[in-house]
């Protein structure tokens, strides 16, 4: 049997080694506390689940769903964008429900990337931007996100010949994994560049509602001209703890939405309708669950940052997202530090290089770990520090 090159040539999952080591440790009966999972540990709010159960009982929802999504869901998404961002969208042409942001992100590459084309991809970043590009036969040009630039790409440094070949630009703020945020002045530069070189922009923004210290993240669609050059992917996963239900949305440029809608109508048959109703309930129902969740995450964030700083690891509290992006101590690579933590004290963190070459020098800690595990994990990390100071004392 011959497996196609696009599968054979997929890069190996970068955390394979460390996950294997963690599994071995667990098999031996040793405890491993994982800060590596980016999946809300809190349940989906009950009013959303109640609606899902009710709709599941209705035989009308047992048949093929409407492929492009229920008109009612299109409307609810447009209403939410109006309420939350004061952005007016045409529910029919500027909104499309998708099977989670990941599905839309992977598939839109097939709409704009032909073999040999280039996609501009943030580094570090969500791996699907570059893998989707590769599956479509294109190549990724990595835009490094550096701390000195607030983890925003330096748009002026992208070479002219790359800009001419670029057929898609990926951006993601509030950013995973760095926790950085972007403002209007950055997005204005994006609109200008995208307009000049006719580069469709895809802004991936599942974390606008996971924010702290009263920070309000903005939508790319709030910027003048954004809808002429791009779309925005959003998701129910992180906002409403709905990762397991697989539903998201893409809004903005009608031509881009139409292309994705056409591709999808040939590949999938839509989102199970009971889940679409659950999404409508999420958008139109009470929103106080968001504040409740953020209160929990913010406390965890503060505990994690304090502990890291305490053990001599530099980390700043992010304004949004579910992650703390921490600098590895001197003398370690990202992978070495993650391995040492796992081996010495049974704590698992994600090496920054798993998100791209510019992730070197960092590790990602997720805040989606239940409180009891979090406290235990942090005290184990304190144990790591104590071991190191003893070790140093012995050497000198
Ligand atoms: C979680 C996440 C996604 C995927 O969201 P789904 O809607 O669950 O597919 C996309 N992009 C980023 C940056 C994420 O962190």
Image: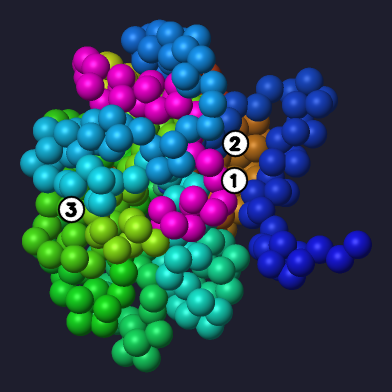
Per the rendered image, the range of residues in magenta is 260-288
Q: Which mark is residue 348?
A: 2
Q: In this view, does 56 lie to the left or right of 288?
A: right
| Circle 3 residue | 221
Q: How far apart are labels 1 and 3 at the CA level?
A: 38 Å
Main SS of the magenta part reads helix
Q: Which of 198 and 193 is in front in this view?
A: 198
Q: Earlier in the sequence, mark 2 or mark 1?
A: 1
Question: Is the shortest distance between ligand 1 and the CB of mark 3 under 8 Å?
Answer: no
User: Is the residue under label 1 in contact with that under label 2 (CB below 8 Å)?
Assistant: yes
Judge whether residue 10 is colored magenta: no
Q: Position of residue 291 (x, y in %)?
A: 23, 21
| Circle 1 residue | 338
Q: Earlier in the sequence, mark 3 or mark 2?
A: 3
Q: Which of marks 1 and 3 is nearer the N terminus?
A: 3
Q: Is residue 136 left or right of residue 219?
A: right
Q: Position of residue 178 (x, y in %)?
A: 36, 50
Q: How far apart are labels 2 and 1 at the CA level?
A: 7 Å
Residue at (22% x, 43% y) in the render = 91
User: In the displayed structure, would residue 349 be above or below residue 177?
Assistant: above
Question: Residue 259 is drawn in which quadrant?
Answer: bottom left
Q: Nearer the viewer, mark 1 or mark 3?
A: 3
Residue at (71% x, 35% y) in the render = 22
């Amino acid at each position: 049997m011959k497996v196609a090159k696009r599968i054979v040539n997929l890069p190996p999952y970068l955390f394979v080694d460390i996950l294997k080591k963690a599994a071995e440790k667990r098999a031996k009966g040793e405890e491993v506390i994982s800060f590596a999972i980016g999946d809300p540990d809190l349940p989906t709010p009950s009013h959303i689940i109640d609606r899902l159960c009710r709709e599941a009982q209705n035989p009308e929802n047992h048949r093929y769903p409407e492929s492009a999504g229920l008109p009612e869901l299109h409307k609810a998404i447009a209403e939410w964008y109006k309420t939350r961002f004061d952005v007016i969208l045409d529910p029919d042409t500027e909104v499309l429900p998708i099977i989670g942001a990941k599905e839309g992100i992977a598939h839109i590459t097939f709409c704009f990337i032909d073999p040999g084309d280039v996609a501009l991809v943030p580094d570090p970043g969500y791996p699907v931007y570059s893998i989707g590009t590769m599956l479509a036969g294109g190549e990724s040009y990595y835009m490094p996100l550096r701390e000195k630039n607030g983890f925003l790409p330096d748009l002026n440094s992208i070479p002219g010949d790359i800009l001419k070949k670029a057929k898609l630009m990926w951006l993601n703020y509030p950013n995973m994994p760095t926790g950085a945020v972007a403002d209007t002045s950055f997005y204005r530069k994006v609109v200008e560049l995208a307009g000049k070189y006719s580069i469709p922009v895809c802004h991936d923004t599942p974390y606008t509602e996971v924010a702290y210290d009263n920070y309000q993240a903005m939508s790319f669609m709030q910027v003048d001209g954004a809808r002429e050059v791009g779309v925005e992917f959003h998701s129910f996963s992180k906002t409403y703890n709905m990762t397991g239900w697989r539903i998201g949305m893409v809004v903005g440029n009608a031509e881009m939405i139409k292309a994705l809608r056409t591709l999808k109508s040939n590949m999938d048959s839509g989102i199970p309708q009971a889940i679409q109703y659950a999404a409508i309930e999420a958008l139109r129902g009470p929103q106080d669950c968001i504040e409740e969740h953020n209160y929990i995450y913010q406390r965890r964030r503060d505990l994690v940052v304090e502990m890291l700083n305490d053990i001599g690891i530099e980390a700043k509290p992010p304004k949004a997202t579910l992650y703390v992006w921490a600098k590895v101590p001197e003398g370690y690579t990202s992978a070495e530090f993650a391995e040492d933590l796992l081996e010495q004290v049974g704590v698992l963190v994600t090496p920054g290089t798993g998100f791209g070459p510019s992730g070197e020098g960092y590790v990602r800690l997720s805040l989606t770990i239940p409180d009891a595990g979090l406290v235990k994990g942090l005290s184990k990390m304190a144990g790591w520090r104590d071991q190191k100071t003893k070790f140093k004392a012995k050497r000198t």
